[in-house]
Image (spheres, rainbow, N blue to C red):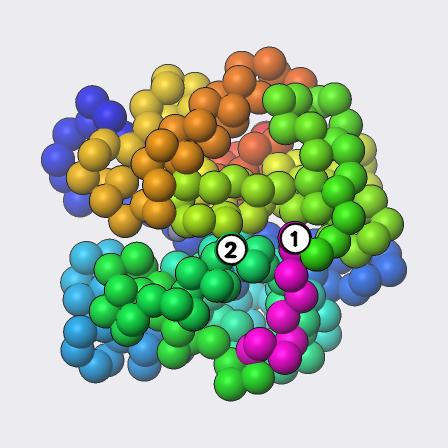
């Protein structure tokens, strides 16, 4: 965070699980998985592990955590990919029955980069299943849907399933076509999963975007700051939307304690 100290920091890599009454189990990203360690075995990909060294206990893998919820890996029908960084897509190979959703912008960017270019952007194509392209659904090809006014200044999303239940929201900057999702829980709460558009809720509350050095990996710093400013505006309006960044320790604790 801008104005922060230099020190090492532990942070979670979160993903979302939605049990949808019609579309079954939907994941938002997958976090890390043992595949990450295979993909970062060779050089130069190994550098990824040095910069952000993950720890992953066997009981913390997504497959194990889903099993704890009574969900088998082959029950997962859809995985919405926020962007292609290794800490968000490392588990894709564990869900053979899932269809994937992402923006064309991000997938296209991945395809056109070299191996080194992808690494420098935090992307590890080795994490994609061999039949990935055949299972991919493109967010931009769905219809636009208006968002409830609680989400202002975000006013539209991609109607991913065609029924208005899950809106894909463009959050460009961190990656070219980063995709968040907005939906309403069964208890009526509006939820906005924002991936890496902000790293923490504190950063939004205190208007502290990442420092220049931490934003080196971003696709566009200018777009990042525009997206971040819109999220700040949403957070400041306090309309009851639960904003969930993927690496926010406080959000994880609050979610677990049901205090958020
Ligand atoms: Zn991330």
Q: CA distance from mark 2 to mark 1?
A: 9 Å
Please identify the residue farthest to the front as the structure is shown.
Answer: 112
Is 108 part of what is drawn in magenta? no
Q: Which residues are magenta?
A: 132-140
In the image, 129 versus 108, the foreground residue is 108
Which comes sooner in the sequence, label 2 or label 1? 2
Who's the residue at 77% across and 27% down the image? 148
Left or right of 201? Residue 26 is right
Query: Which image quadrant for residue 133?
Result: bottom right
Residue under the point 60% across and 14% down = 237
Q: Is mark 2 in CB contact (under 8 Å) with mark 1?
A: yes
Residue 191: percent from left, percent from top: 66, 37
- Image quarter for residue 196? top left
Q: What's the residue at 51%, 27% (across, down)?
A: 231
Residue 173, position as x, y percentages in the image: 41, 41
Disc 1 marks which residue? Answer: 140
Please provide percent x and percent y for residue 75.
72, 74
Q: Which residue corresponds to mark 2? A: 105
Q: Secondary structure under badge 2?
A: helix
**Which numbered marker is on residue 194?**
none
Quadrant of residue 88 within the rendered picture: bottom left
């Amino acid at each position: 965070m801008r104005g922060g100290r230099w020190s090492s920091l532990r942070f979670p890599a979160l993903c979302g699980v939605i049990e949808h009454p019609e579309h079954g189990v939907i994941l938002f990203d997958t976090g890390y998985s043992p595949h990450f360690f295979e993909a970062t075995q060779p050089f130069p990909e190994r550098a990824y592990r040095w910069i952000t060294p993950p720890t992953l206990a066997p009981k913390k893998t997504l497959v194990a955590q889903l099993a704890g919820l009574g969900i088998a890996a082959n029950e997962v029908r859809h995985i919405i990919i926020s962007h292609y960084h290794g800490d968000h897509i490392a588990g894709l190979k564990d869900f053979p029955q899932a269809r994937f959703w992402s923006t064309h912008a991000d997938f296209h960017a991945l395809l056109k980069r070299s191996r080194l270019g992808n690494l420098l952007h935090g992307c590890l194509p080795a994490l994609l299943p061999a039949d990935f392209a055949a299972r991919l659904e493109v967010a931009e090809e769905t219809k636009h849907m208006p968002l409830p006014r609680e989400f202002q200044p975000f006013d539209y999303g991609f109607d991913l399933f065609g029924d208005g239940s899950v809106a894909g929201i463009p959050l460009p900057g961190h990656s070219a076509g980063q995709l968040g999702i907005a939906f309403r829980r069964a208890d009526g709460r509006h939820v906005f999963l924002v991936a890496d558009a902000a790293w923490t809720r504190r950063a939004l509350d205190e208007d502290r975007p990442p420092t220049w050095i931490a934003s080196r990996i971003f696709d566009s710093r200018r777009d990042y700051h525009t997206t971040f400013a819109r999220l700040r505006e949403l957070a400041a309006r306090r309309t009851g939307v639960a904003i969930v960044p993927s690496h926010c320790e406080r959000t994880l604790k609050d979610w677990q304690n049901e205090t958020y």
